[in-house]
């Protein structure tokens, strides 16, 4: 399937073709779920639904100069920021951040992290500032280029590259704080980029 197929499905869905919408949802559900599930303690299913609803509403605004997944992740990112803003307005931002950090203890992804390095890495990612976690996961898990990420989060390309570099450095520092075993930290840090790339398959979704 090509990118045009995705937009054709979206256009059909917007015109009332429900099966086209279901096909598009099935095709991209796992990526969108994965985007939210490692950043939130609760409310992931609702945000996935909100993202696809917002996708249909934003179709007319699309200029045609991005790939479908870039367009989709941009909408998902906006939904994530809105969820964070709602937490702040309700005086629950601290609870939101705590839930994000603690999610590793209850998420299906913990059961899927079969190697100690992978489990440590998941714990570390959830303790990064959200802006750094987003760019690292989009880059290593979803295969987005730094240029595509700059479109998704609406920041200059140079800023994204800086965040990627700072994210890797900060993650190494967080790992050292989380794990008392220096040999485990060393083995994780030594293969950090490889571990990050491989972790994608270990973040489970409800459909598995």
Image (cartoon, helix red, strand yellow):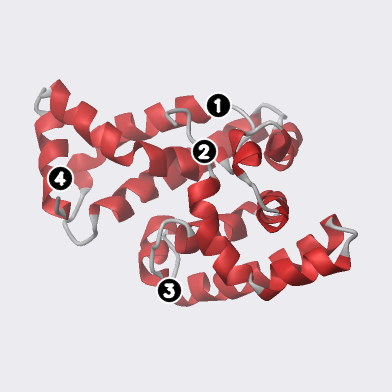
The reply to whether callout 2 and callout 3 are in contact (CB within 8 Å) is no
Q: Earlier in the sequence, mark 2 or mark 3?
A: 3
Query: Going 31% across and 29% down the picture, which residue do you hit?
Result: 53
Task: Identify which residue is drawn at 21% across, 46% down.
Answer: 61
Q: Position of residue 91 (x, y in %)?
A: 72, 29
Whether tag 2 and tag 4 are in contact, CB under 8 A, the answer is no
Residue 11: x and y in percent read 11, 37
Quarter of image, res 51: top left
* Viewer can see residue 12: yes
Identify which residue, 17 or 172, lies in the foreground.
Answer: 172
Point out which mark residue 43 bears: 1
Q: Where is mark 3, residue-wise?
A: 157
Spatial separation of the CA atoms under disc 2 and disc 4? 27 Å
In this rendering, the label closer to the viewer, 1 or 3: 1
Q: Are marks 2 and 1 in contact (CB under 8 Å)?
A: no
Residue 135 in sight here: no
Q: In which quarter of the view is residue 29 placed? A: top left
Q: Residues within 10 Å of mark 3 (few under 14, many from 20)?
A: some
Residue position marked by numbered label 4 in the rendering: 7
Q: Residues within 10 Å of mark 2 (few under 14, many from 20)?
A: many
The vertical placement of 95 against 170, above or below, is: above
Q: CA distance from mark 4 to mark 3?
A: 25 Å
Which residue does the image show at 32% across and 33% down from the upper left? 52
Q: Which residue is mark 2?
A: 204
């Amino acid at each position: 399937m090509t990118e045009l197929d995705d937009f054709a499905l979206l256009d059909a869905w917007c015109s009332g073709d429900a099966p086209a919408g279901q096909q598009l949802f099935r095709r991209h559900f796992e990526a969108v779920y994965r985007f939210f599930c490692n950043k939130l303690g609760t409310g992931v299913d609702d945000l996935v639904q909100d993202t696809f609803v917002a996708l249909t509403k934003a179709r007319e605004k699309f200029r045609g100069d991005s790939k479908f997944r870039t367009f989709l992740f941009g909408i998902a990112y906006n939904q994530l920021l809105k969820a964070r803003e709602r937490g702040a307005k309700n005086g629950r931002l601290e609870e939101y951040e705590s839930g994000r950090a603690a999610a590793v203890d209850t998420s299906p992804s913990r059961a899927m992290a079969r190697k100690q390095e992978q489990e440590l890495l998941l714990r570390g990612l959830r303790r990064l500032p959200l802006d750094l976690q987003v760019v690292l996961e989009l880059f290593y898990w979803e295969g987005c280029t730094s240029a595509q990420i700059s479109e998704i989060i609406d920041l200059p390309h140079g800023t994204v590259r800086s965040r990627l570099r700072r994210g890797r450095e900060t993650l190494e520092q967080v790992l050292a704080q989380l794990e008392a075993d220096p040999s485990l930290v060393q083995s994780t840090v030594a293969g950090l980029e490889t571990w990050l790339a491989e972790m994608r398959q270990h973040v489970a979704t409800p459909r598995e």
